[in-house]
Amino acid sequence: MTGTSRTSPVWHPFSQHQLESAFKKIVKTDGAYLIDEEGRSVLDAISSWWVITHGHRHPVIMEAIRNALERFDQIIFAEYTHEPAEALARGLIRLAPAGMAHVFYSDSGSTSVEVAIKMALGFFHNSGAPRSRIVVMEHGYHGDTIGTMSAGERGVFNAPYAPLLFGVDTIPFPAPGREQETLDALERFCRGREVAALLIEPLVLGAGGMKMYSPHLLTEFRRIAERYGTLLIADEVMTGWGRTGTLLACEQADLVPDILCLSKGITGGALPLAATLCTAEIFDAHLSDDRSRMFFHSSSYTANPIACAAALANLEVWRQEPVSERIRALGVMHHERLAPFRSDPRFANVRQQGTIAALDLAVSRTGYLSEVGPRLRAFFRQRDLLIRPLGNVIYLMPPYCVTVKDLDRAYGAIGEAADFIETAAS
Ligand SMILES: Cc1ncc(COP(=O)(O)O)c(C=O)c1O
């Protein structure tokens, strides 16, 4: 074990080092497992923050990375192009909803959303009728940069930075029975024709607590946005690549966004990469003899060739392997194993969307800082399960190679965890 969390110079994300025990070293990853320095195999039941789709170190993706390394490292993308980026862009356009025509590369989910917001504002600016408002959804999460924090739920995570965050218009989460409220709010905001874009996580709000809503809302969002010339940005950073049961969540409502953000599973989770896809109209609004109308965004590692090669291999895996069947089977497994929890009074709001299963532990203090969160995490860790509840929200989002046996162990531990929390409270 590598000392306590305070003896290493490493500063870990979303971690209170004062309270954290030592961070164990992972020495190897394999399929649905992380192998730690003590040789223990830990089930990665949350796909290492939702990035790993097929399983850790998928052989096709690993081989593509090795091959790319023989030929490439980073290449300045403002000056040159390369075949992995070109082929990947063509591949992404093929699988995205019809109408997506251009691909802008960046390197994380947050930057893909920053790019999307800038594309939307750039579109209106260059069209001569500037708009600057962004509408977002209550409980949304889009990243941790200043721009994406501005678009996300305000709370304990971003309170210190609040003075720097820009104002957005927030529609309520469309909880069952309250959908019309959400739609009315959207219409109210858009009516003034100052709203550049509606930014949403389609079907599932991830970090906001695995909150799920019906696909028909997406159709309504599209209709309202179109009526007022508001662009629709689909942030599929988490929901993309099969998580919700289809390759993209948008497909479940035949939603054609104006801008689509992809990251995480784009490389199967092997390497950092993001892509923001947009319509020809948005791209064309940046075309001009005037250089001041170009799209002013870049980062050093834009379109890293090795990451693009990994993403191309991921597309190959989707083409060659029965990924959809695996996803369907995982969905059925979740459905069956969630059934007993639906009538268990220790749990509430048992829900599922494709490969994502979530349930709330019925406790009095809810929310991200609910004290049951760290206790649950420690409980699961002792059982070699990587499950990081969002406060009292326990969820599973495993890679698609997970087995029935793996899932049974995870669900068994969730049941035991409720006993443990109950016993500790009494
Ligand atoms: C919907 C959504 N958007 C954006 C992000 C930010 O992605 P990243 O952490 O890669 O910056 C996340 C991360 O979890 C996410 O779930």
Image (cartoon, rainbow, N blue to C red):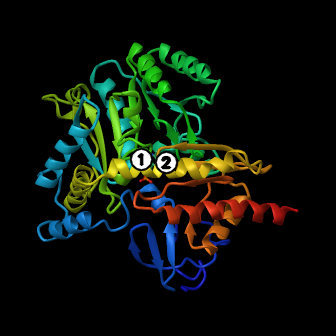
Q: Position of residue 347 (x, y in %)?
A: 72, 49
Q: Is residue 290 visible?
A: yes
- Residue at screen point 58% across, 23% down: 182
As drawn, 402 above or below 121: below
Q: Nearer the viewer, residue 38 or 228?
A: 38
Quarter of the image where the N terminus is located: bottom right
Q: Position of residue 226 (x, y in %)?
A: 38, 17
What residue would you read off at disc 2?
Answer: 332
Which residue type does callout 2 highlight? Val
What residue would you read off at disc 1?
Answer: 328
- Residue at screen point 12% across, 51% down: 81
- Residue at screen point 17% across, 34% down: 291
As drawn, 269 above or below 223: below
Q: Nearer the viewer, residue 12 or 348?
A: 348
Q: Position of residue 358 (x, y in %)?
A: 59, 49
The image shows a total of numbered marks equal to 2
Q: Position of residue 25 (x, y in %)?
A: 48, 79
Q: Furthest-right residue in view?
A: 426
* Image position of 346 (left or right of 215): right
- Residue at screen point 74% across, 49% down: 344
* Image position of 335 (left or right of 304): right
**Mark 2 Cα shell of 10 Å, populated few (<14), some (14-19), many (≥20):** some
